Image: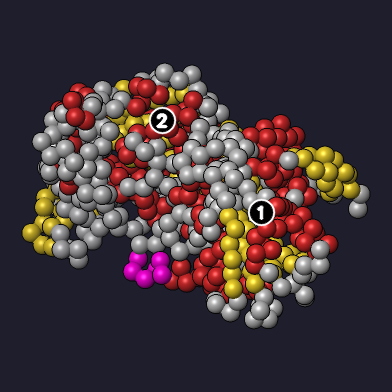
Amino acid sequence: MAKIIINSDKCKGCLLCVSFCPKGLIKKSPSLNKKGLNFVEFSLSADCIGCMQCAVICPDCCIEVYK
Amino acid sequence: MLKKRILISGNEAIAQGAIQAGCSFYAGYPITPQNELIAYMAKHMPKTNGVFIQAESELAAINMVYGASAAGARSMTSSSSPGISLKQEGISYIAGSQLPAVIVNIMRGGPGLGNIAPAQSDYFQATRGGGHGDYNLIVLAPGSVQEAYDLTQKGFELADKYRIPVMILGDGILGQMMEPIELSTEKIKTAIAKPWALCGCRGRKPNIIKSFFLREGALEVFNLKLQKQYETIKKKEALFEGLFLNDAKVVIVAYGTMARIAKSAISQLRLKGKKIGLIRPITLWPFPQAAFKAGNKKRKYLVVEMSYGQMLEDVKLIVNGRQRIEFLGRSGGGMPSEKEIINRINKII
Amino acid sequence: MEKIFTRPETLYDLSMHYCPGCGHGIAHRLVAEIVDELAIREKVIGIAPVGCAVVAYDYWNFDCSEAAHGRALAVATAIKRVHPQNIVFTYQGDGDLAAIGTNETIHAANRGENLTVIFINNAVYGMTGGQMAPTTLLGQKTSTCIEGREKEKHGYPLKISEMLALLPGVCFIERVSMHNPQWVLKTKQAIKQAFQNQIDNLGFSLVEILSPCPTYWGLNPKESLDWIRDVMQKEFPLGKIK
């Protein structure tokens, strides 16, 4: 079992994590953060395997991974 | 304090002065008429465990000096007029990053490739910043090989004291001529500790060497800080030599090699009873304004330069119309002679 | 549960000014990770370029200097010669390293200076508004080659890494990419090798990183990574060059 925590204030909505999550557990949020950008949200699913691809590709170091 | 007397060229005296002052980094590129300086550094720097690099260009050399200075070393580069033009961006960065450095310009004829004869045509470049931005360097103009040795050492002290680039402004004659000088046999200076320098951030917050201030208003604040420092330097560091200023009817204003020729002319004129004096600025920036304060309304000035009137403008600014100013200048490798000076004085008097 | 991925300590916890999907953010993090893993934070001195990463020093917790455009390797040469025990690296873009700074790059490499060079190749000048870089591809459109780069007018994309590999003073050159997480990790390994070489006094080490610039490529972040994968790496082949 694993999970990620996303810092939505730092997120710029580049959506790279969305593309690379092998389980499709990250989605673009309909809300805007303080920067006025659509940040991304983790679906809080138990399917997360902690592969860290999202965190590795994130250019803004927004993601922490727990396993 | 024991002194050793040797016969040495101006170029080499500057190099030896730098080593004596604890210069531990030199980067340069060959260009006539200062090649003896780089050769001397190549030979002698390793003896004091200093770093010598013949850089790939004058541009690279000044940026190496920037780096070495950022790392806390006493650093120097040397060149002649066209090479100094190449260095201007680097000098602006050094000034803007508040780094100490010594830059030697052994002036030659210009513009462009020019020739290798002496000139004083880089006065504007030296005293008006030279590169972009509102900044100044301290400019020291030695008039003898001894002075070249002494002022180079002073240059390093001033550079560190104010965290400012300092230029030693010589010319091809000063660089090449040989005179006996007294060397200090004191121990070579060890570098002073610089808490702002880059050496790895152990035990402290990281240091950043930069001249970039993007935030609204920040660059102006920084510039005001520099300007305030320049005011302090103007008050405290201006130097000149004055001869016969108490009775002179005509005062020659000349610096460097030109002042030596002027002195010969003055000796001859004095023998004939003519009351001629000399103001020899030793710091060209800050320009020694105090030297011009004295003297009655009838005093005249004759500015003599190996240029078409660069220091002349500073003299005009200071004198501000109070007294009459005449000018005698030759450039492109030409030098006003003793005879030309005497003839001109005789017309003025 | 244990935290298995977090921001490296040497990277400040700040929002970076780079565009969404810009490669600089990843590269800065990788440098910070390596500095932490090799425990060299107190010895490292970084030299920032002129370009989008001009304020790279705002993000790293170690000594840094700016340098005039293109002159980072001259500055680095001097710092390393004055402090040989420090770990000195430059972080430069394609203009800084392979246009205005080509001379300093070649000569620092030729002297075999014991330095680490992180070369961010995004085939365009981002900071100044998307002009042609020496590494811009043939046919790639930029604001100074509006119809696309043409070999007759603009010459070919410059393979500076292959050129530097000819120099005996160069010890290590590798071209990597960040177009997917696996390649990001390979980039990290290459950067680690380049720093380790300096620690081991082995000589000049350079890592060329193909990096996305979504804004001036006119692509979204994912498309930019795909462009590197499908187009850019054909012109700039990945792998160890020396």
Q: Residues within 10 Å of mark 2 (few under 14, many from 20)?
A: many
Near-viewer residue (A47 or C234): C234
Outermost residue to the right: B2
Residue B327 x, y percent position in the rendering: 58, 62
Region in magenta: B215-220
Near-viewer residue (B160 or B147): B147
Residue C100 x, y percent position in the rendering: 36, 38
On the question of residue C52 being in view, the answer is: yes
**B111, above or below C158, in the image:** below
Residue B119 x, y percent position in the rendering: 59, 47
Q: Secondary structure at mark 1?
A: helix
Residue C206's label in the rendered image is 2
The image quarter in which residue C173 lies: top left
Q: Secondary structure at mark 2?
A: strand
Residue plotted at (52% across, 26% down): C112
For badge 2, the amino acid type reads Leu
**Tag 1 residue:** B340
Near-viewer residue (A46 or B50): B50
Residue B23 x, y percent position in the rendering: 68, 46
> Is the C-beta separation of discs 1 and 2 under 8 Å?
no
The image quarter in which residue C32 lies: top left
Residues at marks 1 and 2, CA–CA distance in whole angstroms: 61 Å
Q: Chain of mark 2?
A: C
On the question of residue C118 being in view, the answer is: no
Q: Chain of mark 1?
A: B
For badge 1, the amino acid type reads Glu
**Horizontal placement of C217 versus C119: left or right?**
left
Residue plotted at (68% across, 35% down): B36
Q: Nearer the viewer, mark 1 or mark 2?
A: 1
**Horizontal placement of C235 versus A32: left or right?**
right
Outermost residue to the front: B347
